[in-house]
Image (cartoon, rainbow, N blue to C red):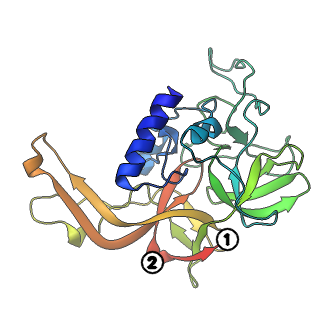
């Protein structure tokens, strides 16, 4: 399955000029809820046991350090076999899963494994170690802006919060990286995060119903930074039948940046943020 998927993705990426990185190669569990109401029902596959490091080796783009030790960005990259966080619910609710290597790294509210896990306000429930609970974990290949460091611990910006993961030098859970980061532009205390980059109302032609542009319950706060993927125009693909003659692509003037916001990606308006190099 790994080899077949990598062959297909490699072919499609080459044909359509798609970069082979985690900002562009998404798991189902990385796709955001399009509106606040849809967040709790979003997919959680392929889950913490999918070996992203192996997958990118098959793609010919191994995940590796791209910056020095004091970089402003890190890419999550634990040793899959040795990284074995505790999960529950694989077989029965609440029951421990069998010990297994994992691509996932757990997040805490402080530099202490006894501190609370991170809460995702969009899910509306307390965080757990459930195998399908994405509240407080990051995944191999995902990149985040560094918020702080403390001994064997690294803090990143995640879901509007400063969160911590254990990252000892001898057994690192992440490697230094470089990239572009976004932060609220000067004068703004926060900016909204969206689950889809849709055009403004004025962009829709007659016969195509305008789609609401509604923010998710998250915000990027002043001083926080998030790794940016591509800059994209607001687009909507109108296709209510299988007859392609009726299909329309609506493209607006508003521009968005895709960002790695939590475990999932999100979008912010380009006009709301400043983009800098890490």
Image quadrant in which the C terminus is located: bottom right
The image position of residue 8, as x and y in percent, is 41, 37
> Which of 39/142 is in front?
142
Q: Which mark is residue 141?
A: none
Q: Which residue is mark 1?
A: 278
Residue furthest out toward the bottom: 187
Residue at the image position 38 percent from the left and 71 percent from the top: 255
Whichever of labels 2 and 1 marks the residue nearer the N terminus, that label is 2
- Is label 2 in a helix, a strand or a loop? helix
Q: Is residue 138 visible?
A: yes
- Is label 1 in a helix, a strand or a loop? loop
> Which of 268/81 is in front?
81
Q: Which residue is mark 2?
A: 271
Side of 22 relative to 86 (left or right): left
The image position of residue 151, as x and y in percent, is 92, 55
The image position of residue 43, as x and y in percent, is 47, 35
Task: Confirm or deny contact between disc 2 and disc 1 (CB under 8 A).
Answer: no
Side of 85 relative to 193 (left or right): right
Residue at the image position 51 percent from the left and 30 percent from the top: 3
Q: Quadrant of residue 74?
A: bottom right
Rendered position, 219 above or below 276:
above
Density class for disc 1 (Cα within 10 Å; few <14, some 14-19, many ≥20) is some
Side of 208 relative to 76 (left or right): left
């Amino acid at each position: 399955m790994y080899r077949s998927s990598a062959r297909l993705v490699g072919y499609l990426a080459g044909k359509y000029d798609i970069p082979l990185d985690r900002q562009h190669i998404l798991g189902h569990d990385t796709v955001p809820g399009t509106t606040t109401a849809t967040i709790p029902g979003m997919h959680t596959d392929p889950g913490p046991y999918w070996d992203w490091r192996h997958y990118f080796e098959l793609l010919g783009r191994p995940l590796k350090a791209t910056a020095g030790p004091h970089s402003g960005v890190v890419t999550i990259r634990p040793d899959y076999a040795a990284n074995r966080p505790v999960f529950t619910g694989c077989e029965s609710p609440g029951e421990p899963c069998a010990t297994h290597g994992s691509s996932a790294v757990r997040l805490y509210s402080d530099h202490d494994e006894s501190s609370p896990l991170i809460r995702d306000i969009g899910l509306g429930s307390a965080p757990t170690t459930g195998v399908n609970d994405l509240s407080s974990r990051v995944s191999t290949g995902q990149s985040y802006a560094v918020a702080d460091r403390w001994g064997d611990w690294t803090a990143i910006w995640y879901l509007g919060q400063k969160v911590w993961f254990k990252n000892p030098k001898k057994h690192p859970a992440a490697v230094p990286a470089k990239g572009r980061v976004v932060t609220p532009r000067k004068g703004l205390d926060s900016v909204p995060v969206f689950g889809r980059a849709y055009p403004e109302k004025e962009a829709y032609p007659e016969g195509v119903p305008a789609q609401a542009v509604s923010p998710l319950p998250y915000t990027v706060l002043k001083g926080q930074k998030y790794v940016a993927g591509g800059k994209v125009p607001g687009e909507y693909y109108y296709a209510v039948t299988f007859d392609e003659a009726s299909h329309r692509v609506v493209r607006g003037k508003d521009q968005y940046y895709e960002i790695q916001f939590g475990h999932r990606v999100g979008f912010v308006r380009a006009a709301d943020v400043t983009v800098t190099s890490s």
